[in-house]
Image: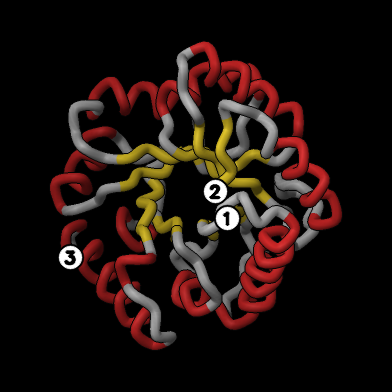
Amino acid sequence: MNLKKRLENVKDRINKAAFKCSRAPESIHLVAVSKTIPANRVREAIEAGVTILGENYVQEARNKFNALGTYPVSWHFIGHLQSNKAKYAVRLFDLIHSVDTLKIARELNKQAKKVDKVQDVLMQINISKEQSKSGSDIENAINLIKDIVFFENLSVKGFMAMPPFFNNPEKARPYFIALRNLRDQIQKTFPDVILNELSMGMTGDFEVAIEEGATLVRIGTAIFGERR
């Protein structure tokens, strides 16, 4: 199956998952995870209909942006961000999914101010409490957002999480529910901050994530094939 067919198949699955739980398909946005994919393949994906690219590494994204920056796509950062890369991140990305410490939030705010930008961000939550994963502790999330919402050059739009990998996507459902519940709890605490976005769900479990409220699904393998 070629890339265009794979992309159409993913979009069809998103639509079916949305209809299954009585959601509008247009409320769910596909982030094509293009990490390690060469620029010519990413260009092919854009021309096939991809509108949001998700990158994990700032330097790799910079190279692709230089090659593809004229295309009308939105660039999202979905990897672990080091504070020394913040100045590049605010210049490249429309949405940063992975803010998980006050240190990185403060640096992003500082760098965004330098370029007169309000940077849209998501807070990454380590919903599974795995030591190998980045993300704020669930217990610390309220304290973290309490500080971040006062930064003039950051705008918190919602949350991101990665559950453990399961062969059965149903096993990921409790983690998606937990992120949605956390969002709802924090939304009540901060009613003036509109936390609409939930970035959750990947190739193996995005349909379940959609059923539990995902607005951004991060899909790479189902579009580009297995990475070498």
Which residue is tagged 2?
Answer: 157
Which numbered mark, 3 or 1, is in the foreground of this view? 1
Residue 74 in the image: state x and y as whole percent.
33, 40
Label 2, label 1: how far apart the Cα atoms are: 5 Å
- Report the amino acid beneath label 2: Lys
- Report the amino acid beneath label 1: Leu
- Report the amino acid beneath label 3: Lys
Residue contact between numbered discs 2 and 1, judged by CB atoms under 8 Å: yes
Nearer to us in this view, 80 or 116: 116
The mark that comes first in sequence, 3 or 1, is 3
User: Which mark, residue 149?
Assistant: none
Q: Which residue is drawn at 52% across and 11% down?
A: 114
Decide: few, some or many residues near mark 3? Use Cα within 10 Å; few <14, some 14-19, many ≥20: few
The mark that comes first in sequence, 2 or 3, is 3
Nearer to us in this view, 5 or 186: 186
Residue 41 in the image: state x and y as whole percent.
23, 42
The mark that comes first in sequence, 2 or 1, is 2
Which residue is tagged 3?
Answer: 5
Please, which residue is most extreme toward the right here? 139
Q: In which quarter of the image is the N terminus?
A: bottom left
Answer with left or right where residue 119 lies relative to residue 188.
left
Q: Residue at x 30, y 35 (%)?
A: 38
Which residue is tagged 1?
Answer: 195
Residue 170 in the image: state x and y as whole percent.
59, 82
Answer with left or right where residue 152 lies relative to residue 136.
left
